[in-house]
């Protein structure tokens, strides 16, 4: 390995902000961008990364919302449009292949931090479902920051250990040594793309994710209208945990609300105020945000754990989701219209 410092920390690299997000992915990316002096608003990052528009539900309805699949590689490519370059290591390994992945991540991360570049990844804190910032290292491992847990120290050859991408489950590290999913990235400044390319590519992913799920997720994950129908049916059949439902509703309200803000600013930046497709897309995401705001009022986070009781409250939640289904369908069509106008 190349000669690097024994220890370094980027103390100004922060995970949490007053305008922070419920999504650890957004917080880690926003913290990295701001550390590099790249002024990006939260709603612009939500939209430019595509995250606002990637509605999805795993067949296991009652798992934490961030554990439902995301197309991380494509999302990081889209974030590069904002004026950065993202590199790193991401992959599953066992035995020697795991050690090789972990060693490659260790080398790249230390070199990046020595250059003053922020790092971030999954499987560092809270498993693969959360993205943590890596702000430093010493001789043994990484220092990371995620959800009020700044300063966690993780040995370099233990990140992602025991975590299977296929299983999305936390394992006992003592039983799963040198087997797991290594995911660690770094970010550095680079030329930014124009607004037209940034918006078009984000919305292309949004439409493809909704209409071609086989390109992006496993067969057990549904996207777009199919995902919303699945969630509605599960709630109607009394199969949904209240605590997780309240968490999911809050996260999706945030996603849709920021998506509407992104689209509104994009329309203005691109001088497309007369675009009917843009108008419909903005209104669709405002309506989705309103529907999910109602869900958060019915089930404020944190709601009680356990299957939601058969009450009038649950009936109102089912009706709210049913009202959102045609809005979701209209939103995808509207985004497709915007994409065509931008080509």
Image (cartoon, grey):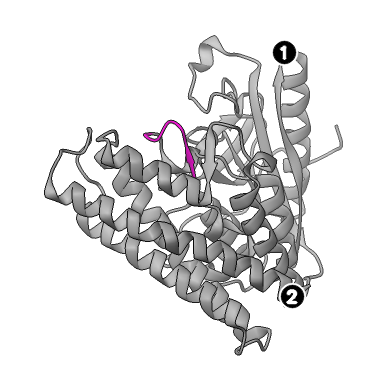
Query: Looking at this view, is 18 or 56 the one in front?
Result: 56
Rendered view: 186 above or below 281: above
Instruction: Judge left or right: residue 101 versus residue 14.
Output: right
Say which label, 2 or 1, has the lower sequence index: 1
Q: Which residue is mark 1?
A: 95
Rendered view: 260 above or below 157: below
Rendered view: 75 above or below 171: below
- Per the rendered image, the range of residues in magenta is 56-62
Q: x and y percent of residue 311 in the render?
A: 12, 44
Q: Quadrant of residue 96?
A: top right
Q: Quadrant of the C terminus?
A: bottom right
Q: CA distance from mark 2 to mark 1?
A: 47 Å
Regarding mark 2 in the picture, which secondary structure is present there? helix
The mark total stands at 2
The label number, if any, that marks residue 342 in the structure image: 2
Instruction: Judge left or right: residue 264 versus residue 298.
Output: right
Q: x and y percent of residue 90 in the render?
A: 71, 36
Query: Looking at this view, is 87 or 46 the one in front?
Result: 46
Residue 112 visible (yes or no): yes
Q: Are marks 2 and 1 in contact (CB under 8 Å)?
A: no
Residue 14 visible (yes or no): no
Between circles 2 and 1, the one closer to the viewer is 2
Tell me what residue is drawn at x 27 percent, y 50 percent.
318
Extreme-left residue of the structure: 311
Tell me what residue is drawn at x 64 percent, y 40 percent.
137
Extreme-right residue of the structure: 2
Tell me what residue is drawn at x 26 percent, y 55 percent.
319
Q: x and y percent of residue 143 in the render?
A: 57, 40
């Amino acid at each position: 390995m190349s000669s690097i410092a024994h220890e370094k920390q980027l103390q100004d690299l922060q995970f949490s902000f007053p305008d922070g997000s419920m999504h650890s992915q957004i917080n880690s990316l926003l913290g990295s961008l701001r550390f590099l002096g790249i002024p990006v608003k939260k709603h612009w990052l939500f939209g430019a990364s595509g995250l606002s528009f990637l509605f999805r539900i795993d067949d296991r309805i009652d798992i934490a919302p961030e554990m439902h699949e995301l197309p991380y590689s494509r999302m990081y490519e889209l974030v590069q449009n904002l004026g950065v370059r993202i590199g790193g290591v991401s992959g599953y390994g066992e035995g020697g292949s795991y050690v090789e992945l972990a060693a490659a991540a260790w080398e790249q991360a230390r070199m990046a931090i020595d250059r003053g570049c922020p790092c971030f990844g999954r499987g560092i804190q809270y498993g693969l479902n959360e993205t943590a910032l890596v702000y430093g290292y010493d001789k043994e491992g990484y220092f990371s920051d995620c959800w009020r847990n700044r300063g966690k120290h993780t040995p370099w050859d233990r990140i992602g250990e025991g975590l299977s991408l296929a299983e999305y489950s936390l394992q006992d590290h003592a039983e799963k040594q040198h087997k797991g999913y290594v995911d660690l990235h770094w970010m550095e400044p680079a030329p930014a793309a124009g607004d037209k390319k940034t918006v078009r590519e984000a919305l292309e992913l949004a439409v493809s994710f909704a209409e071609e799920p086989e390109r992006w997720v496993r067969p057990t994950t549904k996207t777009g209208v199919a995902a919303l129908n699945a969630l509605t049916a599960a709630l109607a059949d009394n199969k949904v945990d209240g605590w997780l439902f309240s968490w999911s509703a809050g996260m999706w309200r945030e996603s849709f609300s920021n998506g509407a803000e992104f689209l509104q600013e994009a329309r203005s930046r691109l001088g497309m105020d007369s675009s009917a497709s843009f108008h419909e897309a903005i209104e669709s995401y405002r309506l989705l945000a309103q529907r999910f705001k109602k869900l958060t009022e019915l089930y404020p986070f944190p709601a009680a754990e356990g299957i939601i009781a058969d009450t009038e409250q649950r009936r109102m939640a089912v009706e709210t989701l049913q009202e959102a289904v045609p809005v979701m369908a209209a939103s995808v069509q509207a985004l497709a219209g915007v994409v065509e106008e931008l080509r």
